[in-house]
Image (spheres, rainbow, N blue to C red):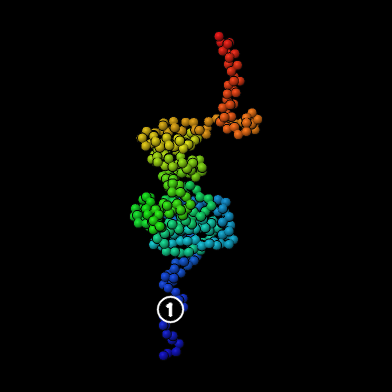
Amino acid sequence: MAKGKGINLNLPSVDELFSTQEERDEAKRESVRNIPIAEITDFPNHPFKVKTDENMLDMVESVKEHGVLVPALVREKPEGGYEMVAGHRRKMASELAEKKEMPCIVRNLTDDEAILIMVDSNLQREKILPSEKAFAYKMKLEAMNRQAGRPSKNNLTPVVSDCNGMRTNEVLAKQVGESRETIRRFIRLTELIPSILDLVDDSKIAMRPAVELSYLPKDQQEILLDTMQAEDCTPSHAQAIKLRKFSEEGRLNEDVVLSILAEEKGNQKEQFRMPKERINKYFSPGTPAKQMEDTIIKALEMYRKPERNKHQERDR
């Protein structure tokens, strides 16, 4: 044997000897890598808004000083590059901090697995807008339905899952701590045009009227939006129900929308209030408010009666 020549026996390493193939594959998938931010694209139809608000500016300062402490989660794209699954805010903070790379865990995920992780990781946030919940719940329920065996991508009809025979909407409701009806209402919001959905996010339209408006066709929602902007008003729940009813009957047009929005709302009626302590001494303790109101009206009528009688005598 010639000196200086070693024999390559291609022996396995110690790690390979004492680990399974599955564990070695998992180690590769879970490795943390510093990935160029330019190679990471956002998750398709990501329902959660990433804003440059005060919290984001605080995160930017933290990234400048300490870097990204918690790695983001990405998956490789077939055409090359990476797709963000969890960590969109960290990515924006890194970009604003002028970082070229960020630490990421690279994991092999199916589309539905990625959707479930993306939604669940963002639902942990303290403040979530109605529109964010709406699209997140819709995406997650669709993914759960597909995993349970329903092939149609856009079918939101709940199906029985593998979780103790519960339907997918029941599983989702339990996971997020909402009722099934609340889940249904949030998902209905995805049928609103963006400008009306923004009014829901801004608390200018409440949930219940928003759900009713979601049943209007898009062109009628546009008419409603124009009327709301022109009249500087938004519909109450009762008005929204009426708008939906006229729409389903094929009778909703610009004039009808204007007529309905012009109706006086219950909370717009002028009311007179008086401090209760000013009138308590005239009533027995525990007298119901309605009884007190009726008594005051009768007293005012008696007070006005002599004056009315005088006017009647003059007119004779």
Residue depicted at 52% across the width and 58% down the height:
90
Q: Is residue 155 above or below residue 81?
A: above
In the rendered image, residue 139, in percent from the top left (x then y), is placed at 42, 52
For this rendering, which residue is in front, 128 or 31? 128
265 sits left or right of 298 in the view: left
Q: Where is residue 210, by image quadrant? A: top left
Q: Is residue 304 above or below residue 214?
A: above
In the rendered image, residue 262, in percent from the top left (x then y), is placed at 47, 31
Residue depicted at 48% across the width and 52% down the height:
177
Residue depicted at 47% across the width and 61% down the height:
73
Q: Residue placed farthest to the bottom in the image?
A: 1
In the rendered image, residue 94, in percent from the top left (x then y), is placed at 53, 58
For this rendering, which residue is in front, 36 or 51? 51
Residue depicted at 46% across the width and 78% down the height:
14
Q: Is residue 5 above or below residue 291?
A: below
For this rendering, which residue is in front, 278 or 192? 278
Q: Which residue is mark 1?
A: 12
Three-letter amino acid code at the position of disc 1: Pro
For this rendering, which residue is in front, 122 or 42? 122
Work out whether residue 76 can be spotted.
no
